[in-house]
Amino acid sequence: MNKSKLGLPIGTTLDRFIRRKEEEFSFATGELSQLLRDIALAGKIINKEVNKSGLLDITGGFGGKNVQGEDQQKLDVVADIRFTRALKNGGMTCAIVSEENREIIHLNPNCRYVVAIDPLDGSSNIDVNVSIGTIFSIYKRISPVGSPVQEEDVLQKGTEQVVAGYILYGSSTMLVYTTGRGVHGFTLEYSLGEFVLSNDNITYPEDGTIYSINEGNFYTFDSWVRAYIEECRRKQMSARYIGSLVADFHRNMMKGGIYLYPNTVKYPEGKLRLLYECNALAFIAEQSGGVATNGNQRIMDILPEALHQRTPLYLGSPKMVKKAVSLIPADTLIK
Ligand code: P6P
């Protein structure tokens, strides 16, 4: 059997991988490993529902709106319930920040980990059978274990993440995560019902020829963004935009590329959420050799001020991101 770069055979189950790599969790008492297993379990359950959504009455609008005022899809609500239940029953989480809930979800105050999660990102693509994903970050709480969770426990910089990952419900279902020592990918082996190691130590190509942005907003972008898009066109790069962040991110990390979601007229602060979308992907990008910025500072250095705070996002191959942000006029950068 071919060995992975880590010396573990490809096909190693996530469970065994976590146990073998548990020394990475320098402060782990097994709680963090169990928390990762809880997320993986919920991902397997969601995967079954996503795969059958066309057959069950769980596609389409739920009829409600989330805290962002966006129409909730039925599977958004289903996914939120599944992850909240898995984390609650797993007993390792003291609080959750979720795209689908305005306030912090308080769980067991005797636990030390906080989870920020987008249970099902890109859910508007569910009805048309396009890949969607779950994005999550795990933090250690700051306030004393046993006390009520405070905002300071959830409004932490991305640099404080202990784990970040995503689950991609695509042509295959993958769980990709980092603990700060490389990025590892696991593919769901249906016959086993297990995530098994398929891509260890994923490396973000230093350069690429794919750019991902919603060019429908072209004429509302800042001039430097338009200039960058025109340069990509001149170089006959490949415009690839699925409109599902996890799918666009994963493809660009595997092949090289840049993902841009600038501020727009509709989203003057940017559309993507710092706590449960951008920070996790920034951690994974950096751990695989990529970069992630808001155009002015490193995404993971931003100190969050609100649970559902948005940010512009430029993330991907270092050479491409650096070229893009080099076009930002000096007078627009916050000093
Ligand atoms: P737009 C999906 O709603 C999402 O949050 C990301 O998954 C995706 O990359 C982006 O928004 C798409 O936004 O404005 O281009 O449709």
Image (tube, rainbow, N blue to C red):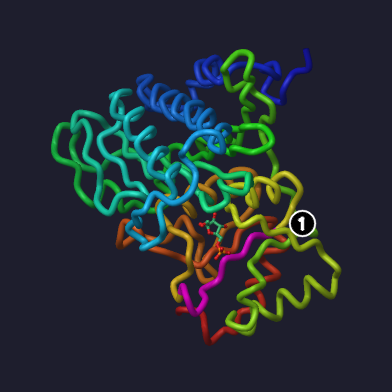
**Residue 177 visible in the picture:** no
Q: Nearer the viewer, residue 272 or 199?
A: 272
The residue under label 1 is 207
Q: Which residue is rendered at x = 60% and y = 84% of the image?
A: 329
Residue 205: give x, y in percent of width and height: 74, 49
Q: Is residue 14 above or below residue 275?
A: above
Q: Is residue 89 above or below residue 157?
A: above
Q: Which residue is rendered at x = 34% and y = 30% of the image?
A: 87
- The image quarter containing residue 28 is top left
Relative horizontal placement of residue 73, taking residue 108 as reference (left or right): right
Q: On the rendering, which quadrant does ligand 1 occupy?
A: bottom right
Report the span colored magenta: 258-267
Relative horizontal placement of residue 245, taking residue 23 as reference (left or right): right
Secondary structure beneath dot 1 equals: loop
Residue type, mark 1 in image:
Asp
Relative horizontal placement of residue 116, taking residue 13 as reference (left or right): left
Q: Which residue is rendered at x = 63% and y = 67% of the image?
A: 214
Residue 282: give x, y in percent of width and height: 53, 52
- The image quarter containing residue 288 is top right
Magenta: main secondary structure equals: loop
Q: Is residue 335 magenta?
A: no
Q: Is residue 234 above or below residue 25?
A: below
**Residue 3 visible in the picture:** yes
Q: Nearer the viewer, residue 280 or 38?
A: 38
